[in-house]
Amino acid sequence: QVQLVESGGGLVQAGGSLRLSCAAAGRTSSMYVMGWFRQAPGKEREFVAAISRSGGRTTYADSVKGQFTISRDNTKNTVTLQMNSLKPEDTAVYYCASGLHVFKNEPVDADFGSWGQGTQVTVSS
């Protein structure tokens, strides 16, 4: 198992940017596909972005394409989600996740076996 800890959430005005980080401990993060999910109040958790083990492939939800960028540094066991041009509808708890599955373009919750505790992102209008 790998332990995941997110950081970087907070309150930002619409149009602003935030950078979320996820630190992985316990096992080398390069063993895992890494992803970000989010859950807004009253809604189901949804996929945001994922990155392959090497970092060479990425995939995004249509709602964040061109707005968010996922990256990883396997030497530091970290995964980052750069969020730009934030909108009030991006308000949610953001979760980092790791999985041993083969990288796919449309992953689901069940593909990921370890989850962080989540970090709150609030975008004010």
Image (spheres, rainbow, N blue to C red):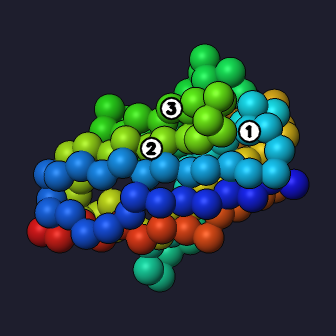
Which tag is nearer the camera, tag 1 or tag 2? 1
The residue located at (61%, 50%) in the rendering is 23
Residue 7 pos. (x, y %): 47, 60
Res 54 visible = yes
User: Mark 2 — residue?
Assistant: 81
Residue 39 pos. (x, y %): 50, 69
Quadrant assignment, res 99: top right
Callout 1: few (<14), some (14-19), or many (20+) C-alpha neighbours within 10 Å?
Answer: many
Callout 3: few (<14), some (14-19), or many (20+) C-alpha neighbours within 10 Å?
Answer: many
Q: Amino acid at mark 1?
A: Ser
Residue 25 pos. (x, y %): 74, 51
The residue located at (61%, 60%) in the rendering is 5
- Which image quadrant: the C terminus? bottom left
Pointers 3 and 2 in contact (CB under 8 A)? Answer: no
User: Mark 1 — residue?
Assistant: 29
Of all residues, the one furthest to the top in this rendering is: 56
Q: Earlier in the sequence, mark 3 or mark 1?
A: 1
Give the Cα separation between the discs numbered 3 and 2.
Answer: 7 Å
In the rendered picture of this protein, how many numbered marks are placed on residues?
A: 3
Q: Amino acid at mark 2?
A: Leu
